[in-house]
């Protein structure tokens, strides 16, 4: 029988320490931008009743205000990063990952059940957007740096939603 | 007495040696290129093509053994005086039990790397083996659980990666080819792999060929080949009953609890075989149920498998095999985050699924029938013909709808292995495969792959050079032929105590029918077809060395480098608002693949370590800068230890996978390293054996693919009765 060397015993001890359990743990829902996060965060306040036909509500951002159907899907983040807003309370925190840059329009998009690209004009609605704090009649411009841009708060009003073509040039009839 | 003889070589001085020489032939007098070795020592040699061998051994009484695949091994005691030489000729008898453990332990013989039998250390590319004893002691339900412990192999939510080849595309388009006894088994529609197509109990061993293997195997062998070799058929009556029962750990935190009971699993398999000298057959059946370790994870599975063999003549063998497996499982999609379920004030609930997905389930089936004829025409020529039909079908049942696909894959191959001169082996063949797919979201399509290939191994002194190429012609719906040529060259250089190997080869993967023609809607956004997809291609380079170090350590190290082009990825068109598979990526992955096996403190103790360093980059294009290639961990470490004490044995596996540098979905979410410890124990007495497995013993909660929880601690007891 060969005797385990000091090095072998140290390796076993090191392995045991290395294997200590530090996996995933519960993480309370954030209320501010997480550390090491690039994007925008804030709270949306819900007004009006959530329609029964709701599929989801997402917060998205446009570098340039979309003035045509062709630019409707130029939003950030990409489709696979979209996160539904929780609709089970009157106020919800969101954190949307975005690349650094300037965003002219931060908007909550209501999606109706049965949405497809073909019926987007009838199944998508602008449900609220971030407003310019100095002039709330104008969209608020948001600059994203390498850290999260916080407090991009706005109201989602299910009673006053608008089809996307309202903002097209020319607008829909 | 044998033990005493075994001790002789150990005390003999290195300069106090003699020579044993002679020939190895079969009962018909034909030379056999067998391995001849000193039992209990390190001396070994291979008989030449004319059957001749020379073996330097310590002086005294030594035990010398000769063995080769398809023959029963023979050993004899030879007395050699110091400085003298002794002649001994071996005669090997053909044996049906050519895959028995006895032969295998002598020196692994593999069949996958060159599409013919060869010794492991004569392969030009790296090979990893998983033996039936390794499979048995892990007490697993599907073979991927054992394959995933092999050096440089990692599974990402069911998708196999060899040296980081595949990444993760939700099971679509595997860059690894699965074979069952040499028959291709990747799905005909999606190009993915069903790892439970064969009952795990029927697998004798697994050969994993790393790097591009398209020179012999064509599409999908871009990153490697996994060959499941089923059990041989012995003579007489044999039966085997295997039962399994176990349970899953509950979530370690109350806020993650999702059910008020402890989930369990269980199943049973029965197998029987009967064989005479000329005719043998085996049949297996089994079923299992699992509650799953997370919400929406239940699975009911049953399977059948059969195999028959007719030895029509000493030089003619006919085989027929088949299997079918069926699953009815709930579909556990991604875990839920805020807005998708009641997260109880948490950012995410890893054990729970999106409320909208509750009730989703999938029914699926997969199976095959394959037949093969093997004939030895002469000393210089053998040929093999095979035909196969494999089928997969599935139906997804969602709360809001359903989809389905049925895929039939017909394949055939004719292959000849010739030895035109004593120093040369040539393998040539032709292969055809045709996929027929009927689906409500892939459409109705056919895809054909027709190929011719050849590879030659030639010996020059101690060196063995291999050169080969394969031409594949791909058709879709009967037209649009695309040609792909996959060459490979390599050399094996035996050195004093080890072997060097160098190889360069080109691999490719044809787009699957799913990638070409999928038409569906994801979250309201259309996924549109792209019939003009081109094959992915990659060049792989490897330099490897295998050698013993000291008396109880064996090392195998390889440096590898792969340059890939036209990799197929889903592309999101933000202008059109649609998704389409396109040939987008250029990528490079390179690194070190190191495997060590040792018996360091006692012969009762067996240990192994495998480490892979992977540097994987997505190369710059017009639209994206160079960046880390998604879903590739930089470090992958596997440690195993087994201690045997009479009929009992204890063992453990530890797997570390470093945090992914980059993932392609939910990139902003936290990623962690994986550290998984499996413990096992087994006890055998007579025909009974019991195996206890505690998988993920530390109950490490982690994900490799974002929002996809990996298995929690699972305790499984398996009882096996063999007759």
Image (cartoon, grey):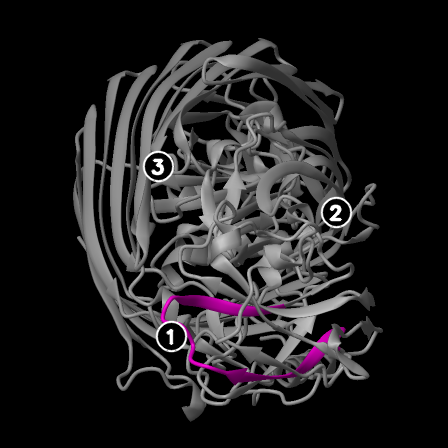
In which quadrant of the rendered view does residue B299 lie?
A: bottom left
Residue B507 versus residue B31 in the image, above or below: below
Image marks 1 and 3: residues in contact by CB distance under 8 Å? no
Task: Read off the residue under disc 2.
Answer: B589
Within-10-Å neighbours for mark 2: few <14, some 14–19, many 20+: many
Q: Earlier in the sequence, mark 2 or mark 1?
A: 2
Q: Secondary structure at mark 2?
A: strand
Q: Nearer the viewer, residue B39 or B302?
A: B302
For mark 1, name the chain.
Answer: B
User: Quick check: is B637 in the magenta stretch?
Assistant: no
In which quadrant of the rendered view does residue B684 lie?
A: bottom left
Residue B137 versus residue B371 in the image, above or below: below
Task: Read off the residue under disc 1.
Answer: B714
Q: How many marks?
A: 3
In which quadrant of the rendered view does residue B534 lie?
A: top right
**Which residue is at a point 56% across and 63% down the rendered structure image?**
B705
Give the magenta-colored segment's residue range.
Answer: A37-59
Task: Read off the residue under disc 3.
Answer: B440
Q: Secondary structure at mark 1?
A: strand
- Cα gap from disc 3 to disc 2, whole angstroms: 37 Å
Does label 3 lie on the same chain as label 1? yes
Q: Earlier in the sequence, mark 1 or mark 3?
A: 3
Within-10-Å neighbours for mark 3: few <14, some 14–19, many 20+: some
For mark 2, name the chain.
Answer: B
Q: Nearer the viewer, residue B572 or B418?
A: B572
For mark 3, name the chain.
Answer: B
Q: Give the image location of residue B551, x and y in percent.
A: 67, 58
**Which residue is at a point 41% across and 24% down the rendered structure image?**
B445
């Amino acid at each position: 029988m060969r005797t385990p060397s000091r090095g072998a015993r140290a390796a076993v001890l090191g392995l045991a320490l290395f294997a200590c359990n530090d996996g995933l743990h519960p993480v309370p829902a954030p209320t501010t931008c997480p550390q090491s996060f690039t994007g925008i965060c804030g709270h949306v306040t819900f007004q009006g009743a959530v329609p029964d036909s709701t599929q989801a509500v997402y917060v998205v951002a446009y570098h340039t205000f979309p003035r045509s159907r062709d630019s409707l899907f130029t939003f950030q983040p990409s489709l696979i990063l979209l996160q539904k807003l929780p609709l089970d309370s009157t106020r919800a925190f969101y954190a949307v990952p975005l690349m650094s840059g300037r965003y002219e329009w931060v908007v909550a998009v209501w999606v109706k059940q049965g949405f497809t690209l073909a019926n987007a004009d009838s199944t998508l609605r602008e449900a609220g957007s971030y407003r310019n704090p100095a002039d709330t009649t104008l969209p608020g411009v948001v600059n994203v740096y390498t850290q999260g841009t916080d407090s991009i708060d706005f109201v989602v009003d299910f009673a006053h939603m608008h089809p996307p073509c309202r903002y097209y040039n020319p607008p829909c009839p | 007495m044998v033990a005493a003889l075994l001790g002789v070589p150990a005390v003999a001085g290195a300069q106090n040696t003699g020579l044993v020489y002679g020939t190895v032939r079969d009962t018909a007098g034909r030379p056999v290129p067998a391995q001849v070795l000193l039992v209990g020592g390190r001396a070994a040699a291979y008989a030449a093509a004319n059957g001749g061998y020379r073996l330097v051994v310590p002086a005294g009484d030594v035990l010398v053994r000769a063995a080769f695949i398809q023959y029963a091994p023979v050993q004899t005691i030879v007395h050699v005086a110091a400085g003298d030489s002794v002649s001994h000729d071996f005669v090997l008898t053909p044996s049906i039990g050519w895959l028995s453990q006895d032969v295998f332990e002598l020196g692994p013989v593999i069949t996958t790397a060159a599409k013919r039998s060869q010794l492991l250390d004569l392969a030009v590319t790296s090979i990893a083996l998983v033996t039936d004893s390794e499979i048995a002691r892990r007490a697993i339900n599907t073979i991927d659980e054992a394959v995933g412990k092999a050096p440089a192999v990692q599974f990402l939510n069911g998708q196999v990666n060899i040296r980081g080849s595949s990444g993760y595309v939700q099971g679509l388009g595997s860059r690894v080819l699965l074979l069952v006894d040499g028959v291709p088994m990747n799905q005909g529609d999606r190009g993915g792999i069903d790892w439970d197509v064969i009952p795990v109990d029927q697998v004798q061993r697994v050969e994993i060929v790393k790097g591009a293997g398209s020179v012999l195997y064509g599409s999908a062998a871009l990153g490697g080949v996994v060959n499941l070799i089923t059990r041989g058929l012995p003579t007489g009556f044999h039966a085997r009953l295997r039962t399994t029962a176990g349970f899953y750990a509950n979530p370690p935190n109350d806020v993650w609890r999702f059910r008020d009971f402890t989930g369990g699993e269980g199943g049973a398999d029965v197998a029987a075989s009967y064989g005479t000298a000329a005719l043998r057959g085996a049949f297996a059946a089994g079923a299992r149920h699992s509650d799953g370790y997370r919400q929406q994870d239940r699975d009911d599975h049953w399977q059948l498998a059969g195999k028959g063999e007719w030895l029509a003549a000493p030089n003619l063998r006919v085989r027929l095999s088949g299997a079918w497996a069926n699953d009815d499982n709930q579909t556990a999609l991604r875990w839920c985050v805020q807005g998708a379920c009641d997260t109880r004030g948490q950012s995410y609930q890893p054990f729970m699924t999106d409320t909208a997905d509750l009730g989703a389930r999938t029914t699926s089936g997969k199976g095959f029938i394959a037949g093969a004829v093997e004939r030895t025409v002469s000393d210089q020529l053998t040929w093999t013909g095979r035909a196969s039909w494999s089928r997969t079908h599935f139906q997804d049942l969602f709360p809001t709808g359903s989809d389905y696909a049925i895929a039939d894959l017909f394949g055939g191959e004719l292959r000849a292995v010739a030895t035109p001169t004593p120093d040369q082996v040539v393998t040539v063949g032709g292969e055809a495969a045709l996929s027929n797919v009927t689906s409500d979201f892939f459409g109705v399509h056919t895809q054909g792959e027709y190929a011719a290939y050849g590879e030659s191994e030639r010996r020059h002194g101690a060196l063995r050079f291999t050169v080969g190429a394969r031409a594949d012609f791909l058709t879709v719906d009967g037209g649009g032929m695309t040609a792909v040529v996959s060459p490979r060259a390599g050399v094996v250089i035996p050195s004093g105590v080890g072997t060097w190997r160098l190889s360069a080869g080109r691999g490719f993967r044809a787009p699957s029918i799913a990638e070409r023609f999928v038409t569906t809607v994801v979250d309201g956004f259309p996924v549109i077809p792209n019939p003009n997809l081109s094959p992915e291609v990659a060049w792989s380079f490897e330099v490897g060395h295998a050698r013993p170090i000291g008396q109880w350590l064996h090392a195998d190290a390889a440096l590898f480098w792969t340059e890939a082009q036209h990799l197929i990825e889903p592309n999101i068109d933000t202008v059109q608002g649609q998704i389409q598979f396109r040939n987008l990526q250029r990528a490079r992955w390179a690194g070190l693949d190191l495997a060590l096996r040792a018996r360091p403190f006692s012969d009762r103790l067996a240990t192994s370590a495998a480490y892979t360093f992977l540097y994987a980059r997505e190369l710059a294009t017009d639209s994206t800068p160079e960046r880390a290639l998604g879903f590739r961990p930089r470090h992958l470490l596997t440690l195993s230890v087994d201690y045997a004490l009479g009929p009992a044995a204890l063992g453990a596996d530890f797997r570390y996978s470093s945090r992914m540098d980059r993932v392609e979905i939910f990139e902003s979410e936290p990623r962690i390293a994986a550290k998984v410890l499996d413990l096992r124990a087994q006890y055998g007495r007579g025909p009974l054996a019991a195996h206890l497995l505690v998988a993920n013993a530390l109950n490490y909660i982690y994900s490799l693919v974002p929002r996809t929880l990996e298995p929690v601690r699972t305790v499984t007891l398996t009882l096996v009765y063999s007759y």
